[in-house]
Amino acid sequence: MSRAVPVEPDSPVEDAPVEDAPKRRRRRLRSARLAHITATTVVALLGAVVGVLLVPPTKVDVGPLIATVHLRPSLESDTVILLPPVGEVAFDTHTAPVRVEARVQGVDTEQAEQLLWSSEARAELTRTVPEDLTGAAARNAALNALFGAVGAGLAVGLTFRRLRRSVLAAGSAVAVVAASVGAVSLTFRPDSLYQPRFEGLLSQAAYVADVGQGALADYSGYRDTLAEFVGQVSALYIAADSLSPGIGSQDLITVLHVSDIHDNPQAFDVIEQLNGQFDIDAVIDTGDIVSWGTPFEHDLLSAIGDLDVPYVYIAGNHDSSVTAATVADQPNGIVLENEIVEVAGLRIAGVGDPRFAADDDSDAGGWREGDAAVQSSVFQLGETIVAHDEANPETTVDLALVHDPTQPEGLEGRVPLVLSGHMHTSSVELDRDGSGTDWMIVGSTGGALGSGGVRPVLDGGEPLDLTARLLYFDAETRRLVAYDDIVMGGLGLVSISVQRTQMPAEAPALEIPEDAEAPPTPTPTDLDIEPGEGLPDEERVTPTDPSVPMPEGSDGGEG
């Protein structure tokens, strides 16, 4: 007979599984639900991110600017204007995980010029710009919501095969995008637009060439970058409202003045870009286009023929007669030797430098020896101008070209404007010596590359700037009404500044100063420059040793 074993009614050994089962099931359900929600959320988020990343930028025309607007998820809450390849300008405008990018793609220069001259166009632009940008941002936000919803819905639907989850994920993505855009709008701070942050080339000039170590890194790429940079900034400069006062809407003749290129091919890249952006009518080059006059250097001059505008040139003291002939051989090359031509509606007189110092670096001494020859050539050009104007009182000479500006007497009071180079630094002297003649010197468009341009870098200093000047003439009166000084970073630097200057409304009458009636000292009799012929190199003055000390305050920078 078996004995029954008593069991305690409250024994935990038998009751625990019965009471804990529902709890365990509930915990398992909660864990499974949380895992499903987490997985769905992660998949939806990944799908939404992929979708948003595929959103194309929204194109918008803002006046003359052709731009795109793009909203991106980001931990950096800012508005950024991208100016490739210049860099970017950023503004801390809002508090939301969204980055608003506006990228300038190009500029309609025709429309930019209309904007420049028309107050009605500027007023219209002021009115429509906020609407244009806001509309583009709204359209891009809608695209973000659409692409995010599609991405989230597809990712969840393909992963879990549940329509309800897919629809819920898509709706959540739309809600998140809407909340982010709403946060941008609600937290937008207009005053932040007055506190920009500059990055890239806008904040500092970046060296791409270490000349001091004797290595040049990707110089050809740097040339292209600088040329493109000039083009971008130039186009924006045309569109700038602040440039319009003083020029008005009259028909203009635009001339680009360059000088002292000294073998720098980069200068021709810049000329080409400026020509494309400013619709130049002619280029004037006041000499020293090379440094030694060798055949190798002359290969560079074929770039002149690629320009679609006249290229008016006078020889500098570093240019040989072969250099001048090479320029003249270009389809658009015009070389002046004590003669007058009409180009782009302007009557231009010019004479080459009577010295030939191709083997002289100018600061090694000797260049003062040719003062009398320079003075003689300037007076001969002045006499040519006077004779022309007396014979043609209705079509007088508008401007004259000489390389060296240090002997001005022969042209003072005889012509309204003289353009020169040689000094490697830019300057402007209006009404020089009370003669009514304005004298403009442009610095080295080539950064004096073959004539002292590399030495400052080797010495640990900064290279010479590349400079050029745009001249605006009234097409009817042929009088200069404004000019732009363009200064670019030299060898290994990428930077640019453009400054507009208006000419005085009234120009003083031309009057030859008493001491400029005739040369004050005897001039060489063997330096008679026949119009159109010039001097053979063997008859030009070749400096050897200085005949007089260098002028006080000179640093020997001329070339």
Image (cartoon, rainbow, N blue to C red):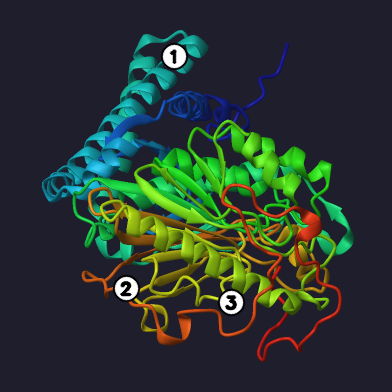
Identity of the residue furthest to the right in this view: 214
Sequence-first disc among 1 and 2 = 1
Q: Position of residue 432 (x, y in %)?
A: 41, 79
> Foreground mark, 1 or 3?
3
Q: Can residue 506 be seen in this view?
A: yes
Query: Real-space Cα distance between discs 1 and 3?
Result: 77 Å
Helix, strand or loop status at disc 3: loop
In the figure, is residue 529 to the left or right of 413?
Answer: right
Query: Any mark on residue 510, and which?
Result: 2
> Foreground mark, 1 or 2?
2
Sequence-first disc among 3 and 2 = 3
Q: Give the residue at mark 3.
A: 406
Sequence-first disc among 1 and 3 = 1
Query: Any mark on residue 163, and which?
Result: none
Labels 3 & 2 near each other (Cβ < 8 A): no
Up/down of 438 relative to 310, above or below: below
Up/down of 28 relative to 447, above or below: above
Please identify the quadrant where the C terminus is shown: bottom right
Which amino acid, mark 1? Leu
Q: Position of residue 45 (x, y in %)?
A: 47, 29
